[in-house]
Amino acid sequence: MKGEAKPQFTRYQFLLVAIIAVVLMTIVLDFMLMSALSAILLPKLEITTKQFGLLASAYPISAGISAILISGYADKIDRKKLLLFFYSGFLLGVLFCTIAPSFQTLIVARIITGIFGGVVGPICFAIVTDLFETTQRGRAFGILQMASAGSQILGLPLALYLASEVDWRVAFGLVLFLGIIAVFLVFWKIMSIDKHLQIPAKVNPLHHSLKIISNKNYLVVFLNNTVLVSGDIILMTFSSAFCTNNLGVALDDLPLLYGIAGIATFIFAPIIGRLTDKYGTLNIFLVGTILTITMVAVFTNLGINPLWTVIIVHTLLFLGNNARSISSSALGTVVPEIEDRGAFMAVDAAMQLAIGGMAAMIAGLIVFQSEDGMINNFPTLGVVVISLMILTSGLMYVINRMVKRRGDAESLGEIEKTN
């Protein structure tokens, strides 16, 4: 992947990736909002860390089940139609979150949101993989990573402000408002995406799913992505509650904390994408991992500190995670064949979400909140996260070698054809 020609984006590719970024911004905002609200929901709903872990896991577990069920059909339908259906269902779930009167009803609303929202991400990634060349994907995923940054710069701080000053349900109303705009953009501006339908279907949907799950090369990518996401979720589920109760960050300063991290991500995500295309996915992933491990060790062992200290550590932590996410996404999407991409993305998302949901529950079991409000056992949480990051580094090395071997084999095949 290193040293290849890097074709420029067409005007439609720019428009497409911008719309997909808006869609993903709402998905990311909704997902991040739950963990960011831990400092508010724990006292407001009068729940324990175990109960909040269950609440945080409702979305990813239901999304994982949904994604695995749809995986066999993901390559049988126009990707635009599939996106419109599941994104509309996601917005319906968000609507239910805005009117949920209690802890129990909020769990039900999160399950509905997850059933539909969990499939939106893989559909978006399959669209990008279909319409962007291999040497463009680092830049494309770098732009998509700006969706996360946009959520942090604009959406998350505003949502947290609304949650603290008005009501936590209003924060979900913001997601719903942005989502309505996004769904109209998808309907109006994105053309049909059906190139994958031109490839004759060789197996039925169930067999297709089984084929994806049984492919050993795909399994390595699935394992890497689930471990990567699990580490992030374990750390972030109670990060806002940890910041406010243990590090001395005021509740009113949470929007600033997440906003600055978002601005940094917005600036550096496209740069990281270009560096990924230029220097190779594995190299950028390892640099990001070293940075993240360092910041996790610092963050989880901090005590009361000035706000600027927490902001610096928190921001560097986000940047390291973004470098890992961009590079792993760019490398992982090279592995599946075109006729498998939709199903591959769906199964990948299913495994990430299901294991991620379990990770949220594990985080709720590791930490506990004492009567003074302190979140205890966060250093133990850090050790678990760092161990998972080391594991992903080894898996990324295996995936990188696998991709290189396939590339060498394809090059040899082309040479033989010309002779």
Image: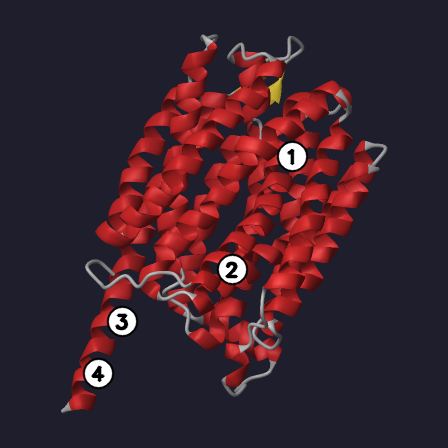
User: Is residue 174 placed above or below 344 in the rendered structure?
Assistant: above
Disc 3 is placed on an element classified as helix
Disc 1 is placed on an element classified as helix
Q: Earlier in the sequence, mark 3 or mark 4?
A: 3
Mark number displayed over residue 34 = 1
Q: Nearer the viewer, mark 4 or mark 1?
A: 4
Disc 4 is placed on an element classified as helix
- Place of residue 148 in the rendered image (x, y in percent of width and height, measured from the top left): 51, 41
Q: Nearer the viewer, residue 383 or 400?
A: 400
Mark number displayed over residue 16 = 2
The kind of residue on which mark 2 rests is Leu
Q: Nearer the viewer, residue 211 or 188?
A: 188
Q: Which of marks 2 and 1 is in front?
A: 2
The kind of residue on which mark 1 rests is Met
In the rendered structure, the answer to whether residue 274 lies left or right of residue 178 reads: left
Mark 1: give few (<14), some (14-19) or many (20+) Cα within 10 Å: many
Q: Which of marks 3 and 2 is nearer the N terminus?
A: 2
- Provide the residue designation for mark 4: 414
Q: Quadrant of the C terminus?
A: bottom left
Q: Earlier in the sequence, mark 2 or mark 1?
A: 2
Mark 2: give few (<14), some (14-19) or many (20+) Cα within 10 Å: some
- Place of residue 225 in the rendered image (x, y in percent of width and height, measured from the top left): 44, 51
- Provide the residue designation for mark 3: 406
Q: Earlier in the sequence, mark 1 or mark 3?
A: 1
- The residue lying at 45 percent from left, 67 percent from top is 131
Q: Nearer the viewer, residue 378 or 290?
A: 290
The kind of residue on which mark 3 rests is Arg
Q: Between marks 3 and 4, how big is the CA–CA gap?
A: 12 Å
- The residue lying at 44 percent from left, 74 percent from top is 338
In the rendered structure, the answer to whether residue 364 lies left or right of residue 96 reads: left
